[in-house]
Amino acid sequence: MPQQNKPLHPNLSVPRDGWGRPLIVPEGGGKAKGHTRTTTFIDCIEDKSNLIDWKARNVLIGMTRRPDLADKARELDPEDAADKKRLNALVEQAEDAAGANEKSRKGTYLHDLSEYVDRGDPLPKTISEADLDDMAAYIMATSVLKVIAIEQFVVVPELGVGGTFDRLAFYDGPGPDGKPIAGNFITDTKTGNIKYGALKMASQLAVYSRGKLYDHTHFPAPDKDDKKAFAAWKKQEFTAEQAAQAYSPLPPVNQDWGIIVHLPAGEGVCNLYWVNLNIGWAMANLALEVRKARSTKGAMLPFVTQVTTD
């Protein structure tokens, strides 16, 4: 895997809480607060029925390939808290046995290879012919784009969201309507099926396009394994002046349109698609309202049979 010269991914270097949320010091200062990951934030607007069906099929296939998993599951109680965790682990093993995770691993690998290309580095000599075909297709399709930045972590304070975009790229040519368009665009490489994900992708890129660059190294955090030191760091207060040093604006970026680079693994083809960021931003704000609504209380009350008096 091409990892040797790859910089640490922002998603791995930004401090995180116990739920995996990036811990961000607010612009106005204060303690680091957990922010929702961009992809998690917009998940609530996505119809997951196809994903759920796909996962269920994989579990079934995995169980036929690993009968021992079914034997282990037979002894567990789905209502018991400890057994639930064991069952969840068996589900993951069944999915892996069905090959469900192979596409994800392959997609991550292609992302790594695309970074070699976009950094101008030579590809590893050990990659397969199929990978070379994929990269040749990627190079040809993205030749119209000039990469400005790779994997940058941004924060959108009004949404309480933090995440990493794939690329910021300059493009000058025909736009979605065929008329000339030029400027910097958020681009994202997808290696899986994009048939049902248009709204989510548009929302994801829209959020990134409205983000602010955030440099967490202004607030060095101890290793998370040192629980005492990490807990003390989370309680630390930072001044507004300190916080301001960590934030910087993105270069001018188009907030109307983004670009999806679709590179399906092993097919030797790559296509670009425009995504409407105005639609995406509307969906992001809808996601915000949905998340706020989830905390609404009083929707259901106990039924009483006696009149109460003040």
Image (spheres, grey):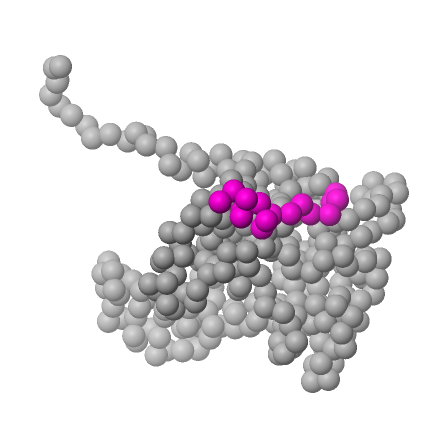
**In magenta stretch: residue 247:** yes
Is residue 231 visible in the rendered image? The answer is yes
- Residue closest to the eye, 60 or 92: 92
* Residue under the image location 64 percent in, 56 percent down: 152
* Residue under the image location 49 percent in, 48 percent down: 25
Left or right? Give the position of 218 relative to 80: right
* Residue under the image location 57 percent in, 40 percent down: 284
Is residue 40 visible in the rendered image? The answer is no
Left or right? Give the position of 47 relative to 77: right
Looking at the image, residue 283 lies above or below residue 164: above
Looking at the image, residue 58 lies above or below residue 24: below
**In this picture, which residue range is highlighted in magenta?**
239-254
The answer to which quarter of the image holds residue 82 is bottom left
Q: Considering the image in quadrants, where does the N terminus appear? A: bottom right
Left or right? Give the position of 81 relative to 158: left
Q: Considering the image in quadrants, where does the C terminus appear? A: top left
Looking at the image, residue 118 lies above or below residue 302: below
**In magenta stretch: residue 270:** no
* Residue under the image location 25 percent in, 60 percent down: 81
